[in-house]
Amino acid sequence: MNYQNIAGTDTAKKILFWLLLSALIIPCGATDVMPADVPTEADEATAPEMMTDAERTTMMEAFEAASASSDAASIEDDEYDDLLTIDDTPTTDNALLSDGKDPTEGCWIATNQRTGKYLCGWQFYVQDGTLYARILSATGATAETYAYGCRESYPGYESDVPVNTLKMFGTTFIWGLKQVRPGVWKGGYVIDPDSGNFYRCSIKYRAADGKRFKRDVLEMRGSLVWFPLLGLTQYWPAATYEEAASIE
């Protein structure tokens, strides 16, 4: 499908952009379950700082400039990832952990970016040079919840059985990420097990700096497969395995 036919005018592109900002939720294992309660002090204390208005404006300007370019359709995947990265400065002086693992490996918690409410826990791991992630727990789901909203298969997703027959917990829903350098991975995909939608994704480790990030976070960038310029960035705080596996 040619996205230029769908977003053929500047107005249409802006409408698509705002619709995505308001409706696209990077999957967290239970995206249709939104928190109804007011966040507690503990929730607010653990929530990472959100994107600033200036950063949102920068992202919007970059999107509009790229959309207006006649060369937009010829940009390669790696160039799209560069456009989508807000800040590509080194994440830390020593991004490789002392045990030799990449700093993205381990557990992270997807949160509601407005309230900081925990939504689901992810475990990231590297296998044969590729970064993957599985869901450990999520609000509104149990160990017996199946990914019924998924399709039977996805491009590049390896499974011996239909994806919609797999359980939500323990199944890999992020795959295909390749390392650019320690703490930075691009070229992957992520499935929302509730809706069955899947997106491009890139991952970047952000070390706590006492300013913007009070704790280590994972910068999770998701974008539309057919139009990578449209997407959202979320920040997932680091967690222990026990924390990531105990969200209800």
Image (cartoon, helix red, strand yellow):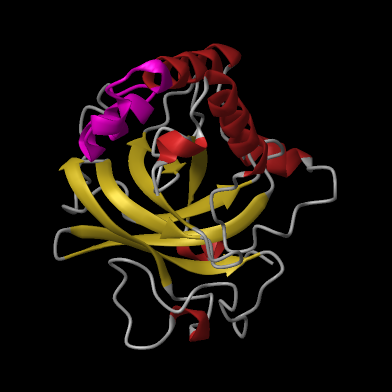
Where 4 falls versus 152 (above or below)?
above
Q: Can the viewer see residue 56?
A: yes
* Numbered marks: total: 0
Q: Quadrant of residue 41?
A: top right
Q: Position of residue 91 (x, y in %)?
A: 29, 29
Q: Is residue 86 magenta?
A: yes
Residue drawn 22% across and 46% down?
97
Q: Residue furthest right?
A: 37
Of the pair 138 and 18, the residue shown nearer to us: 18
Residue drawn 52% across and 60% down?
197
Q: Position of residue 138 (x, y in %)?
A: 62, 65
Q: Quadrant of the C terminus?
A: bottom right
Q: Position of residue 56 (x, y in %)?
A: 54, 19
Q: Quadrant of residue 81?
A: top left
Magenta-colored span: 67-88
Where 94 falls versus 30 (above or below)?
above
Q: Can the viewer see residue 218?
A: no
Q: Position of residue 21 (x, y in %)?
A: 61, 34
Residue drawn 50% across and 32% down?
7
Q: Is residue 155 magenta?
A: no
Where 47 falls versus 61 (above or below)?
below
